Image (cartoon, rainbow, N blue to C red):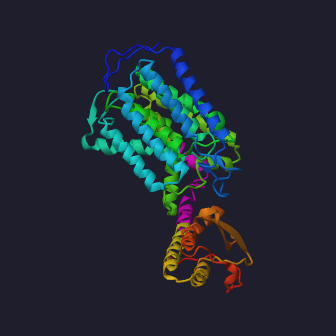
Amino acid sequence: MLEPPSQYIVMGPWSPRYVSWLEMACYFGGALLVAALGTWWILSREGSFGLDKPDTRRKLHEKAISRLGGAPIFLAVGLASLVAGYIGGLGWTRWLPVAVCNALIFSVGFVDDLKPLGARVKLVGQIGTALILYAMGVSIDILSNPFGEGALVLGWWSLPLTLLWLVSIPNIVNLIDGMDGLAGGFGLFLCLTLAFLGYYSNQPDVLVVSLAMAGALAGFLIFNLPPAKIFLGDGGAYLIGFFIASVSLFTSNKGSVIGALLVIIIALGVPILDTLFAIIRRAIRGVSIFNADAEHIHHRLILLGYSKGGALAAMYAVCLALSLVGVSILMTKGYALPIVGALLFLLALGTARYLGYIRSWSNFRAQINEAMERRRQREFFRAYGRVLDFEVERCTDLQSFATLLQHGLERMGLSLHARTGSEAEVLTLGGGRNFTIHRPKDATDRREWHLRLDVLVPVLERCLEKWRELPSSTGIPDRQTAPLVPPSITV
């Protein structure tokens, strides 16, 4: 049984009460059953909307798979919260802001699963939801020392810090959602960690809602483990991340949450490290941090020879270990924090080397120079892509533009025609249209060529908008018969 605390600061009417182990099992098991049945129902419908289709580049699953897995999770947690509030007697008034904003963030992701909104629109929705939660009184106002005396009143820093916490965690969870069972499994471990924090701090409501989310994720994972029959989608990933971020603000007294945040940050060690690697990698390459790639930690593990199941088990094990480490820091009053900090730093360096992000410490500078050269090549392609985009506007007919396109492609070392030493790449456009480009068959990684060639997709889609057809290689003479050579850039 949970003993009610002698003193407790709350937001709204709520009375602490005992929660039996049987009740805990009922909330977890009930949410698991609802989520599993809901997921099964979605799969049985075999709908034609909300599908994630393979693209032969990053999405390598064999057939289109539903991205609506967040819906049954949302339903299960919502029903469990209603039962806890009205039947379980745990109260619901103080949870109203969290419930409303979790519904809002889920709606943003779910709409994107049905029809892509774009990264900027989703970011605005995330910030807007976080602002609403802040305005409704859920915020980080005081950072007290959970391991001793003293506190820091944040003042106006409360707003940016709260927004950073509420926006970054959903995006971190969404970023790692690139492998069957990964984001859902991490969410399960993190929700169990939150449940323990609720137990440890004598907050039965935190315990109950966290167990409900953990049960819902367990029910969903039945159909999401490799090979996945359904995906979380942005709706599910945003819901998991925002749930963890918002509920963690309740695991300590109002506005004084540094202990709980520290535990969650350590438990999120793997996805945070993956996000950090992705930001650094994309910054060096000169691409947007929202530009998806296939070089996350789980991709690297598979390249090292792990099976999907093996890579997933390895990452689960690390996540579980870090969750236990985070809890141990809180329970030892922070005495283990310096040691854990040093170990995590060494873990990050070792992981970067083991996964091949850093090929050799002795040649690290040469690796950076090589990456910067690839960035210059990509910027060169982007510049020509913008020029061709302008030419679409200036040209009065498709034939005139096709001639300019051929010239621009030659400057980029590309062609519309097959030549000696060339390799065909198919660009997928809106509406299911395809366009074939021939590029040099050289030592450059194929994923690097994909990044370069993607600048041509908006140009070709503009052609479709203006002329309702694409340039044809049959109508353009091949003015060069020599093998294709990638462009060289002198700096």
Q: Is residue 353 magenta?
A: yes
Q: Is residue 290 left or right of residue 93?
A: right
Q: Position of residue 60 (x, y in %)?
A: 68, 52
Of 127 and 182, which appears nearest the observer?
127
Residue 332 vs 379, above or below: the answer is above
The secondary structure that most of the magenta stretch takes on is helix
Residue 28 placement: quadrant: top right
Q: Position of residue 198 (x, y in %)?
A: 43, 24
Residue 59 vs 268, above or below: the answer is below
Residue 85 placement: quadrant: top left
Of 237 and 159, which appears nearest the observer?
237
Q: Position of residue 482 (x, y in %)?
A: 71, 83
Residue 56 vs 74, above or below: the answer is below
Residue shown at 47% from the left, 36% from the top: 266
Res. 200 in view: no
Res. 104 in view: yes
Q: Is residue 296 magenta?
A: no
Q: Position of residue 306 (x, y in %)?
A: 69, 44
Residue shown at 60% from the left, 36% from the top: 316
Residue shown at 68% from the left, 43% from the top: 308
Of 283 and 222, which appears nearest the observer?
222
Q: Is residue 485 left or right of residue 161?
A: right
State the extent of the magenta-drawn residues as a range. 346-372
